[in-house]
């Protein structure tokens, strides 16, 4: 039986054993979007269905190294967890470990640590959280001051510029950083490296980076950064996505035409239906049986403007005007 945790009142449920462990077995536990869950002070409010299976969570007072180090409360899973939503943790004032409480940010680590921005700190209840809008993968969660851990990623943006994807990111602190791999995927599972960008190594100020992907795939494109340190430890950024429509080169000849018009197009195998439309958009001819003809006979139609419309297998359409003489 799957176990569903439906905890809504966080503070009374949270334990502060610094050596506590939580283990989920093969059935795991699952929670629905918008539900607050607290495991020994580590809190989740997922925006998508979330579960932990075959994993053990350990709480340790050993801080992540930095200047200053993280707080002395570090949550570590045996294997990585992927999560989107509100991630937070309760801590004790005695665990601040020379950090200024109001300057704390949620920090996480898969291999190398990453400090978030925009965290909310309640210094009365000693609770911190951050609303993570894109999935992150981590083994470790804690809190640290902005710029205290090896790489502080300020932002990572992706936007369309014509038929290209423009990727830009910036850091506000780097220590021992080596390079960034810009990675791309069409399914958010299988990734390939587009470019390797040299990092600043040591930096206490704002550093800006950029890359342009000139040939994104038709459909949804996913992008992320792999941030690699000199010791080859690494961490991933949040994932950004952009959607590009398929671009097809279509030509009709002759145009104007008298008897027949021929269709020239790459990737003809992607066409599902061919239509001849009148100037008002009404369907005059339709061909959907294989093999589709690349030639349309317009001899019996009056002179005027017509449209050859191609319906593609992915649901998109393309249309080209033709004049009948």
Image (cartoon, rainbow, N blue to C red):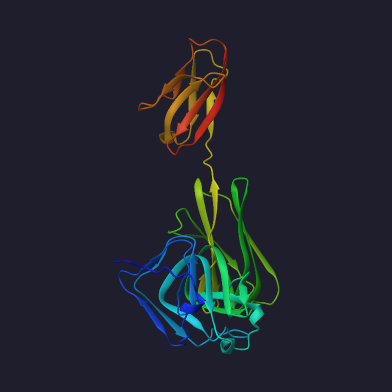
Residue under the point 53% across and 25% down? 252
Q: Residue 22: x percent and y percent? A: 39, 79
Q: Nearer the viewer, residue 61 or 89?
A: 89
Q: Quadrant of the N terminus?
A: bottom left
Q: Quadrant of residue 121?
A: bottom right
Residue 280 vertical position relative to residue 105 in the rendered view, above or below = above
- Give the x, y percent position of residue 3: 34, 68
Residue 286 in percent (x, y) is at 43, 22
Res. 142 visible in picture? yes
* Above or below 236: residue 231: below
Q: Residue at x 40, y 69 (%)?
A: 5
Which residue is the extreme one toward the left? Answer: 1
Vertical comparison of 205 with 211: above or below: below
Q: On the image, which quarter does residue 150 sit in?
A: bottom right
Q: Residue at x 45, y 67 (%)?
A: 82
Residue 182 visible here = no
Residue 69 position by quadrant: bottom right
Q: Quadrant of the C terminus?
A: top right
- What x and y, as percent, mark residue 126? 58, 81
| Labels in figure, total | 0
């Amino acid at each position: 039986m799957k176990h569903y945790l439906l905890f809504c009142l966080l503070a009374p449920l949270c334990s502060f054993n610094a050596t506590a462990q939580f283990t989920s077995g093969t059935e795991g536990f699952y929670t629905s979007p918008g539900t607050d869950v607290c495991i020994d002070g580590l809190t989740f409010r997922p925006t998508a269905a979330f579960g932990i299976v075959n994993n053990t969570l350990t709480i340790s007072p050993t801080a992540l190294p930095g200047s200053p180090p993280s707080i002395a409360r570090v949550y570590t899973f045996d294997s990585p967890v992927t999560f989107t939503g509100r991630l937070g943790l309760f801590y004790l004032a005695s665990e601040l470990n020379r950090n200024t409480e109001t300057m704390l940010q949620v920090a996480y680590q898969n291999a190398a640590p990453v400090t978030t921005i925009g965290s909310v700190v309640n210094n009365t209840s000693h609770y911190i959280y951050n609303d993570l809008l894109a999935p992150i993968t981590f083994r470790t969660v804690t809190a640290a001051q902005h710029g205290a851990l090896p790489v502080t990623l300020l932002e990572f943006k992706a936007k369309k510029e014509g038929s290209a994807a423009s990727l830009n990111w910036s850091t506000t602190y780097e220590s021992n950083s080596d390079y960034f791999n810009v990675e791309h995927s069409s399914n958010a599972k299988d990734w390939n490296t587009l470019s390797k960008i040299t990092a600043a190594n040591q930096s206490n100020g704002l550093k800006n980076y950029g890359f342009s992907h000139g040939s994104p795939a038709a459909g949804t494109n996913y992008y992320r950064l792999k941030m690699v340190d000199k010791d080859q430890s690494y961490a991933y950024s949040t994932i950004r996505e952009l959607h590009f429509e398929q671009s097809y080169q279509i030509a009709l000849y002759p145009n104007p035409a008298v008897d027949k018009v021929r269709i020239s197009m790459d990737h003809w195998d992607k066409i599902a239906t061919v239509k001849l439309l009148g100037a008002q958009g009404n369907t005059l001819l339709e061909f959907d049986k294989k093999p589709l003809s690349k030639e349309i006979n317009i001899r019996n139609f009056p002179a005027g403007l017509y449209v050859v419309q191609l319906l593609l297998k992915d649901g998109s359409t393309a249309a080209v005007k033709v004049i009948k003489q």
